[in-house]
Image (cartoon, rainbow, N blue to C red):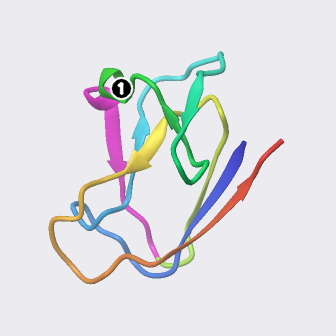
């Protein structure tokens, strides 16, 4: 799967941006699927301490592949977060 995550406005720390794993990994992670058929990692807590929250400027995009563990940061402040997210399943 490839994910294109495009910020529609500036997203600062603690405003619910993305968290991305800090290390490079050259292997595929096994994903599980929830009731809505949305993929997630089985051992997400394992990566929590090695992730960094990404801030965005309006229009900035991040392209993520299956080798990059990622997720949404907790939204603790600021206006609603708006992003265009395009997922392509291969």
Looking at the image, is 49 positioned above or below residue 2?
A: above
Query: Residue 77 appears at what percent x and percent y?
Result: 16, 72
Q: Residues within 10 Å of mark 1 (few under 14, many from 20)?
A: some
Residue lying furthest top:
27
For the record, the magenta segment spans 47-57
The image quarter containing residue 24 is top right
Query: Residue 59 appears at what percent x and percent y?
Result: 56, 76
Horizontally, is 31 left or right of 9 in the view? right
Q: Residue at x 34, y 34 (%)?
A: 51
Looking at the image, is 30 positioned above or below residue 14?
A: above
Residue lying furthest right:
90
Residue lying furthest front:
35
Q: Residue at x 57, y 19 (%)?
A: 25
Quarter of the picture holding the N terminus: top right
Looking at the image, is 25 positioned above or below residue 16?
A: above
Quarter of the picture holding the C terminus: top right
- Of 75 and 37, nearer the camera is 37
Residue of label 1: 47
Task: Report if residue 89 lies within the magenta region.
Answer: no
Horizontally, is 57 left or right of 63 in the view? left
The image quarter containing residue 48 is top left
- Of 1 and 5, nearer the camera is 1
């Amino acid at each position: 799967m490839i994910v294109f995550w495009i910020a529609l406005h500036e997203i600062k720390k603690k405003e619910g941006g993305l968290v991305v794993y800090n290390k490079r990994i050259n292997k595929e992670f096994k994903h599980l699927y929830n009731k809505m058929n949305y993929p997630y990692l089985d051992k997400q807590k394992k990566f929590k301490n090695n992730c960094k929250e990404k801030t965005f400027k309006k229009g900035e995009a991040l392209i993520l592949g299956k080798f990059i563990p990622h997720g949404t940061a907790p939204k603790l402040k600021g206006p609603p977060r708006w992003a265009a997210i395009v997922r392509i399943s291969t």
